[in-house]
C-alpha cells in the first residue's frame, strides 16, 4: 500500500494551484494521500488543502522560521514527517525544484524529476533533453520515492474533500546560515513572456511595427504576455527578447494565440508544450493549423477587433 | 581599437576539410618540427562538411597506411552501382554504368565524420586545430605577400558595435598560408582577384548539391548500394541528377546536384530535389522514414579549364578552393586530399609557395581533370547531346585535341521575358520536409542574430528595381535555405535577408545575375551543424 | 577563497536530439558535445568573482570518462586555474555526483560551489541542492545575481512569481540560471595555454564514493506530436469554444 506525502506550495494565504496538480499525479499512483502544509499561520491554507478531493489527512507544521519556504528549514521538517511514507512528492515549480532534491539527499535517494505520467507505483515517465525524449524511470523497492510532478502534465484535482487537519511541532530551529531578504514580484502591466499563463504572439503578417500594436492591445485585454516570431523580430516589428521559438524563448503557457504565424517548425518548437494553441491565419494551408487546438482561417486585422468587441 | 594579439605558426591552414587536413597531416609527417595550425569556422570539425560521399581510398592508403584497421565512423565498401534515367510519370530506364562511375573498391563515407576522424590523426601529430573560429581576412606583409590570416571579431552587434562579450580576433602570422576553404571561399575569392589568379583560365563554374540523410524503415537500405539518377525532374536543358547511397544502420544518404548554369530564372533547385524524391523508385525507399540531417553546398564544376593559378606569394589554393573536383566521376575527395598532400610535399621540400602551380599541373591530379575536361561542357547543349559527346570523350580518354570553353554561371540566367520553361511534369509532394524552412531545421543551422548580416548586398537598389522586372528576384528561389525574401509591394518593396538560416553553401554569391551578393564569414562557430553528412 | 565549478559534458544545445529506434537512448552518433550551458554561466560567474579580487582560485570538476577532459580543457581555456576529473566508467546519478564533488570540496577547502541549475540532457536539477544537503550548508538555487560580501553571499533567485533575494553564509552552494551573465568567448591563445594547465584525475573509488543509485533507467521514447485540433468559422465561435474550455 502506497502512502504518499505531498508538500504543499503556498504563499501564506493561498494554496498554489501546482499543489492540486501534484495531487492528481499522486492520485494516479494510488494509495493514501496526505498533504504537508509547512509555514507560519497556515490554518487557512491547511483548510484549502483539506478541501481537495482525495486527501486523507493534512499535516501542518507551524513555526515562525518556516514562514518563508527556505529549503534548508523546510527540508529538515519534511524529512522528520517523511518517516512512514513510501512517496514524498512536490510540484516541479521553482519551489519544488529547490526543495525536493534537498529532501531526497537527506533521505539517501535520487529524485524522479518532473513526472509526466505514471506507469506503476514506482515507475514513471519524465521528459529529458528539454522534452525531446521521454524516459521511463523505476525507483528501487528499498528506497523512498522522492519526486516532483510536472505542472503542465497534470490537471488540478477538484474540491469537495474534507480531510482531517493535524498539527505537528517543528523538530528543529532555524538554519542559521540562510536568511530571507525579500521577494520582488514581477509584472507591472504585462506578464513576463516566459512565465505568463496566456501569451499572444504575432508574425510577419502584422506587416509593420505600428500594426504590431494590435497584438499588444489584445494581450493587455486578456492579461497576456506578448511574443513574436523570428520573422517578426527580424523585420523589426517587435524586440528580440520577445522571440518565441528555437532560437528564442521556449514557453508553455496554458493558452497561446498565434496571429498571422505560419507555424514553421522553428517556431512550433518553442510552443510545443503549450496547453491550448489558437491559430488565426489567412492561409488555410499554413502549417500552424496542424498543431493548433483551435484554428480560424481569417484575416487577423478583422478577427482581432471582433474578438476584442466580443470580450467586451 | 587596440593592437590585435598575434600567434605565430610556420603554416596556417584555413578550413578543416579533406585537403586542408591531409596537407596538415602530411606536413607533420614530413617535417615534425614545423608548427602547423588549422582554423575552421564550423563549431567543430565536420560541422560544415557536406558531401555524398563515395571516395577512392588511394590517398588514404598513402597518407595513413593501415587506416582500414580503425576506419572512419561511417565507411561502407561499395557493393554495386546502378544508374537510372528517370522519366516523368514514374517511369525509369536502367543505363549502363560509364567507366568513371564504376565504384568497385571505393567506400561510402560521411565526409563530415571522416574529417573529424582526420582531425584526430592531425592532432595526434601535434597540429593545432581551432574549430569555431573564422578566418575573416587575409593578413598581408609589407612586401605584399600573404602573411597569415585575421580571425574574425566575436561579440559584435547587428550595427557593428561591440557587445559586452566583445572579443577582438587575433592575427595568425605564418610565412605560408594554405587556403582550403572549399568551393567559393570568401578569402579565396579575394585572393584570386588581388593576385589575378584567374587571368589565364576560364571562369569557374558551379553546381549546387543538396543532401539529406535519412533513417529508413528496416530492410529498405541495402548497405553498399550506390545509385545515381539523371533525367526527371529536370528538363533536358538543366544539367544534374541525384545520388542515393545506402549506408549501414538503415540509413540512406540522398542528394541532388544541378549545374548553376541553368537559364530559367524561375527555376527552384530545392524544389527539384524534393520532386526527385517523389519518383516512385525513390519514394518507396523513403516512405515511413525520418530525416536525420540535411543541407546544401556549392560544387566546383569547371575542372581543367577553370583551374586558376594556385600559388601566390606566401599562399596556395588547394582542394576545391582551387577546384579539383572530377565532375564525371562525381568525386572530389580523393583529388582534394591528393592536392593537399602535394602541397605539403612541396612546402616540406622548398619551404615556399613558388613552384607549386607547375607541380600541380604536372601531377596526376590535373591529368585526371584533363582527361574528362570536355564531358561537363558537352551538356551545355542539353542532356542527350551531352550524353553522346560524353560517351565519345570517355572512349577516347579525352585525347581529342579540342577543349570546350567554360562560361560563368551568373551570366547564364535568362531574363523572365526571354525564357519559357518546358513542361517538367512535377507532382504534388508529401514527403518531408514540406519547405525550405523545414529543411533548414535539420541542418541545425544557428547564427547569433545580433551580429552584422554576413550576406552583404553591394547595391541594394538593384534588388527592388532592375532585378524585380528582369529576373523576378531569383535569390528567393536559388537559395536552398530561404535566406532571401522580398517583402512589401511597390515603394514598400524590400529585400529581407534571413541570415540566420544560411547554411554557407555560397550559391547566392555565385548565381546572382548582378553579382551584388557578397558572402562573408559570420562569427566563428555559426552556421550549420551537420551530423554525419 | 577557492571556488569549485561543476562542468558536465552534454549533447550541444543546438543538436536535434533523437530517440534511437530501439529506445535504448538518444542518438549521439556524430553529434557535437559541449559544456552544459548553465555550467558555462557558473564558470563565467566564478571567473568574474576571481577577477574582482574576491577569490584566489577557480577549480573546474567533472565526473566521467576521459572524454570529459575535453570539456575541462574548455573550462581551463575560459580561465579556470586547474581541473579535476572524477573518473568513472559508469553514468552517475545526481546523488553520487553530489557525494563525489563534496569529497573534492573537503579535500580542497572550497568555500563557494557554483553549479548550473540543471544539465540540459537529464534535466534533473538536483546536484546543487543535494550537495548543500549532504554538506549541511546553504543552497541558493536559480541565481540571477550573486553579490559577495565578506563571508556571505547575497543571491537573487529566479522563482516563478518573480525575484527572491536571500543571504547565505559561506561556504555555500549556488546554482545559476540563464540570466546571471553571458559567458565570454574563449580567446585562441588561451586554448593553447589551457593545454599546459594542471588537469588531475582521481577515481571515484579513491574518493570513497560508490557507483550506486536507486533509479533504474528504462526505455526512451519520442514525445507525442501535437495533434490537429478543430477549426472554427468565426471569432464568435472561437470565443465560445475558449469559454467552453474554461480558458477565457
Image (cartoon, grey):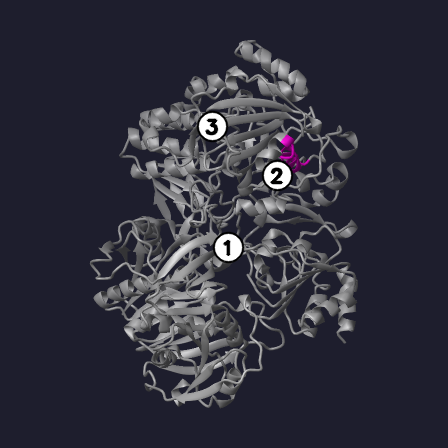
Q: Which residues are magenta?
A: B268-280
As for residue B269 lying within the magenta part, the answer is yes
- Predominant SS along the magenta part: helix
Q: Position of residue B507 (x, y in %)?
A: 60, 37
Find disc 2 in the rendering and name its residue. Answer: B508
User: How far separated are the C-alphas under marks 3 and 1?
Assistant: 32 Å
Find disc 3 in the rendering and name its residue. Answer: B224
The chain containing the residue under callout 3 comes to B
Find disc 1 in the rendering and name its residue. Answer: A132
Kindly check if marks 1 and 2 are in contact, taking CB atoms under 8 A apart as contact: no
- Give the answer, above or below, for where A239 lies relative to A162: above
Q: Position of residue C6 (x, y in %)?
A: 34, 61
Q: Can residue B118 be seen?
A: yes
Q: Residue at x 32, y 73 (%)?
A: A106
Q: Nearer the viewer, residue A126 or B345?
A: A126
Give a yes or no on whether discs 2 and 3 share a subunit.
yes
The chain containing the residue under callout 1 comes to A
Amino acid at each position: 500500500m502506497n502512502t504518499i506525502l505531498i508538500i504543499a506550495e503556498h504563499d501564506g494565504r493561498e494554496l498554489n494551484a501546482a499543489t492540486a496538480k501534484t495531487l492528481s499525479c499522486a492520485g494516479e499512483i494510488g494509495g493514501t494521500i496526505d498533504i504537508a502544509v509547512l509555514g507560519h499561520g497556515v490554518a487557512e491554507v491547511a483548510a484549502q488543502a483539506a478541501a481537495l478531493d482525495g486527501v486523507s489527512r493534512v499535516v501542518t507544521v507551524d513555526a515562525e522560521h518556516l514562514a518563508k519556504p527556505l529549503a534548508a528549514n523546510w527540508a529538515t521538517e519534511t524529512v522528520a514527517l517523511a518517516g512512514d511514507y513510501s512517496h514524498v512528492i512536490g510540484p516541479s515549480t521553482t519551489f519544488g525544484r529547490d526543495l525536493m532534491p534537498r529532501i531526497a539527499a537527506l533521505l539517501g535517494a535520487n529524485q524522479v524529476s518532473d513526472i509526466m505520467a505514471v506507469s506503476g507505483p514506482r515507475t514513471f515517465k519524465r521528459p529529458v533533453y528539454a522534452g525531446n525524449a521521454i524516459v521511463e524511470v523505476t525507483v528501487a523497492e528499498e528506497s523512498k520515492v522522492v519526486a516532483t510532478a510536472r505542472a503542465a502534465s497534470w490537471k488540478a484535482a477538484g474540491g469537495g474533500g474534507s480531510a482531517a487537519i493535524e498539527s505537528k511541532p517543528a523538530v528543529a530551529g532555524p538554519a542559521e546560515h540562510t536568511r530571507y531578504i525579500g521577494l520582488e514580484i514581477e509584472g507591472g502591466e504585462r506578464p513576463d513572456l516566459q512565465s505568463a499563463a496566456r501569451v499572444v504572439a504575432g508574425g510577419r503578417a502584422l506587416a509593420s511595427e505600428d500594426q504590431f500594436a494590435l497584438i499588444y492591445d489584445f494581450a493587455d485585454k486578456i492579461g497576456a504576455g506578448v511574443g513574436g516570431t523570428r520573422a517578426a523580430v527580424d523585420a523589426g516589428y517587435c524586440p528580440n527578447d520577445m522571440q518565441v521559438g528555437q532560437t528564442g524563448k521556449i514557453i508553455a503557457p496554458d493558452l497561446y494565440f498565434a496571429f498571422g504565424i505560419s507555424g514553421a517548425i522553428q517556431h512550433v518548437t518553442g510552443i510545443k508544450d503549450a496547453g491550448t494553441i489558437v491559430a488565426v491565419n489567412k492561409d488555410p494551408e499554413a502549417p500552424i493549423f496542424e498543431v493548433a487546438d483551435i484554428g480560424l482561417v481569417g484575416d487577423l486585422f478583422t478577427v482581432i477587433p471582433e474578438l476584442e468587441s466580443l470580450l467586451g | 581599437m587596440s593592437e590585435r594579439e598575434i600567434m605565430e605558426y610556420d603554416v596556417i591552414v584555413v578550413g578543416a576539410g579533406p585537403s586542408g587536413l591531409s596537407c596538415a597531416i602530411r606536413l607533420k609527417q614530413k617535417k615534425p618540427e614545423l608548427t602547423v595550425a588549422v582554423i575552421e569556422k564550423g563549431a567543430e570539425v565536420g560541422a560544415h562538411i557536406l558531401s555524398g560521399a563515395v571516395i577512392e581510398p588511394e590517398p588514404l592508403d598513402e597518407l595513413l597506411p593501415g587506416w582500414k584497421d580503425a576506419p572512419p565512423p561511417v565507411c561502407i565498401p561499395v557493393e554495386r552501382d546502378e544508374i537510372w534515367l528517370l522519366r516523368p510519370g514514374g517511369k525509369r530506364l536502367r543505363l549502363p554504368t560509364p567507366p568513371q562511375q564504376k565504384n568497385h573498391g571505393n567506400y561510402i563515407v560521411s565526409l563530415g565524420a571522416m574529417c573529424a576522424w582526420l582531425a584526430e590523426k592531425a592532432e595526434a601529430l601535434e597540429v593545432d586545430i581551432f574549430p569555431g573560429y573564422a578566418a575573416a581576412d587575409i593578413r598581408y606583409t609589407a612586401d605584399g605577400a600573404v602573411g597569415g590570416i585575421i580571425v574574425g571579431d566575436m561579440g559584435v552587434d547587428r550595427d557593428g558595435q561591440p557587445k559586452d562579450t566583445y572579443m577582438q580576433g587575433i592575427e595568425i602570422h605564418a610565412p605560408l598560408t594554405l587556403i582550403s576553404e572549399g568551393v567559393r571561399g570568401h578569402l579565396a575569392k579575394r585572393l584570386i582577384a588581388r593576385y589575378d589568379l584567374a587571368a589565364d583560365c576560364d571562369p569557374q563554374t558551379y553546381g549546387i548539391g543538396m543532401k539529406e540523410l535519412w533513417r529508413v524503415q528496416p530492410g529498405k537500405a541495402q548497405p553498399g548500394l550506390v545509385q545515381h539518377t539523371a533525367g526527371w525532374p529536370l528538363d533536358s536543358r538543366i544539367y544534374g541528377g541525384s545520388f542515393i547511397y545506402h549506408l549501414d544502420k538503415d540509413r540512406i544518404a540522398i542528394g541532388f546536384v544541378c549545374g548553376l548554369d541553368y537559364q530559367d530564372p524561375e527555376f527552384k533547385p530545392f524544389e527539384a530535389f524534393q520532386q526527385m524524391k517523389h519518383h516512385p523508385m525513390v519514394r518507396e525507399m523513403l516512405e515511413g522514414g525520418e530525416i536525420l540531417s540535411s543541407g546544401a553546398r556549392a560544387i566546383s564544376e569547371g575542372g581543367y579549364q577553370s583551374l586558376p593559378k594556385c600559388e601566390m606569394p606566401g599562399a596556395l589554393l588547394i582542394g576545391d578552393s582551387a577546384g579539383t573536383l572530377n565532375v564525371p566521376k562525381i568525386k572530389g575527395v580523393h583529388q582534394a586530399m591528393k592536392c593537399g598532400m602535394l602541397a605539403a610535399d612541396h612546402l616540406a621540400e622548398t619551404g615556399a609557395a613558388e613552384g607549386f602551380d607547375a607541380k600541380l599541373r604536372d601531377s596526376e591530379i590535373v591529368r585526371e581533370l584533363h582527361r574528362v575536361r570536355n564531358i561537363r561542357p558537352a551538356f551545355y547543349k542539353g542532356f542527350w547531346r551531352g550524353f553522346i559527346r560524353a560517351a565519345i570523350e570517355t572512349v577516347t580518354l579525352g585525347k581529342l585535341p579540342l577543349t570546350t570553353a567554360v562560361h560563368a554561371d551568373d551570366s547564364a540566367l535568362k531574363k523572365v521575358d526571354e525564357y519559357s520553361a518546358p513542361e517538367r511534369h512535377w507532382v504534388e509532394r508529401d514527403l518531408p520536409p514540406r519547405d525550405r524552412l523545414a529543411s533548414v531545421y535539420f541542418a541545425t543551422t544557428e547564427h547569433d542574430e545580433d551580429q552584422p548580416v554576413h550576406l552583404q548586398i553591394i547595391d541594394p537598389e538593384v534588388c527592388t528595381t532592375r532585378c524585380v522586372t528582369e529576373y523576378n528576384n531569383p535569390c528567393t528561389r536559388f537559395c536552398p535555405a530561404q535566406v532571401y525574401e522580398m517583402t512589401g509591394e511597390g515603394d514598400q518593396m524590400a529585400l529581407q535577408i534571413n541570415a540566420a538560416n544560411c547554411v554557407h553553401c555560397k550559391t547566392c554569391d555565385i548565381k546572382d545575375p548582378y553579382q551584388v551578393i557578397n558572402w562573408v564569414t559570420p562569427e566563428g562557430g555559426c552556421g550549420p551543424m551537420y551530423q554525419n553528412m | 577563497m577557492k571556488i569549485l565549478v561543476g562542468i558536465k559534458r552534454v549533447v550541444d544545445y543546438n543538436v536535434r536530439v533523437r530517440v534511437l529506434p530501439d529506445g535504448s537512448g538518444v542518438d549521439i552518433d556524430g553529434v557535437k558535445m559541449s559544456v552544459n550551458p548553465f555550467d558555462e554561466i557558473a564558470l563565467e560567474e566564478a571567473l568574474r568573482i576571481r577577477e574582482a579580487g574576491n577569490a584566489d582560485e577557480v577549480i573546474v570538476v567533472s565526473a566521467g570518462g576521459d572524454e570529459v577532459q575535453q570539456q575541462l580543457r574548455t573550462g581551463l581555456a575560459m580561465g579556470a586555474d586547474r581541473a579535476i576529473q572524477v573518473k568513472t566508467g559508469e553514468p552517475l546519478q545526481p546523488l553520487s555526483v553530489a557525494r563525489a564533488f563534496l569529497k573534492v570540496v573537503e579535500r580542497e577547502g572550497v568555500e563557494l560551489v557554483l553549479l548550473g541549475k540543471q544539465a540540459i540532457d537529464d534535466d534533473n536539477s538536483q546536484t546543487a541542492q543535494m550537495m548543500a544537503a549532504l554538506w549541511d550548508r546553504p543552497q541558493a538555487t536559480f541565481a540571477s545575481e550573486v553579490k559577495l560580501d565578506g563571508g556571505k553571499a547575497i543571491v537573487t533567485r529566479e522563482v516563478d512569481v518573480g525575484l527572491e533575494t536571500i543571504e547565505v553564509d559561506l561556504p555555500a552552494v549556488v546554482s545559476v540560471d540563464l540570466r546571471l551573465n553571458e559567458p565570454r568567448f574563449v580567446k585562441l591563445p588561451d586554448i593553447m595555454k589551457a593545454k599546459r594547465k594542471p588537469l588531475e584525475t582521481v577515481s571515484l573509488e579513491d574518493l570513497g564514493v560508490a557507483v550506486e543509485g536507486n533509479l533504474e533507467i528504462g526505455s526512451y521514447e519520442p514525445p507525442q506530436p501535437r495533434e490537429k485540433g478543430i477549426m472554427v468559422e468565426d471569432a464568435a465561435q472561437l470565443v465560445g469554444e475558449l469559454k467552453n474550455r474554461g480558458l477565457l
